[in-house]
Amino acid sequence: MRVGITLGDPNGIGPEIAIKAAAHFANHGTIKPLLVGDGFVIEDTANHLGLDATPPFIDAPGLDPAGYAPGRLDPRAGRATVTYAEAAVRLAREGRIDAIVGCPHSET
């Protein structure tokens, strides 16, 4: 099963949860995770976590890099959360993923 995992709030705990989940299931026989969110957020978070490789992802640009401030509420991050969910729904409609999991988010 191909599972799209959206990042949730890019400034919150969502990216860390998404990346850890994707890394955990990356070698699973039946679950194929695919992260959905801003590529620069995924890469930065993976580096922060000390991962040797970034799990597979679809770059779904939703956040201006100026709005990337982990640990801070920002309306731009809330809008990005919605963009990630919309991208995941498109992937599901196109048949590229079978399911969607959304990580913690805020629409502030």
Image (cartoon, helix red, strand yellow):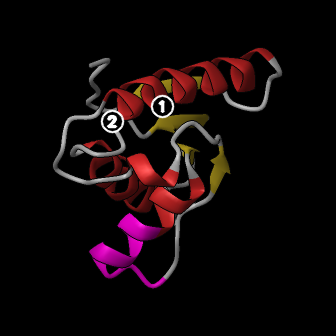
Q: Name the image quarter holding the N terminus.
A: top right
Q: SS at mark 1?
A: helix
Q: What segment carries the magenta color? A: 44-52
Task: Name the main secondary structure of what is drawn in magenta.
Answer: helix
Q: Residues within 10 Å of mark 2 (few under 14, many from 20)?
A: many
Q: SS at mark 2?
A: loop
Q: Residues within 10 Å of mark 1 (few under 14, many from 20)?
A: many
Marks 2 and 1 close (CB-CB < 8 Å): yes
Residue under pointer 2 = 9
Residue under pointer 1 = 80
Does 81 lie within the magenta span?
A: no
Does residue 15 lie above or below 100 as drawn? below
Q: What residue appears at the point 54 percent right and 30 percent down from the top-left corner?
A: 84
Q: Amino acid at mark 1?
A: Ala
- Please give left or right for residue 59 compared with residue 99 in the image: right
Q: What residue appears at the point 36 percent right and 44 percent down from the top-left corner?
A: 10
Q: Residue furthest left?
A: 71
**Location of residue 47 in the rendering, given as x and y in whole percent from the top left corner:** 39, 77
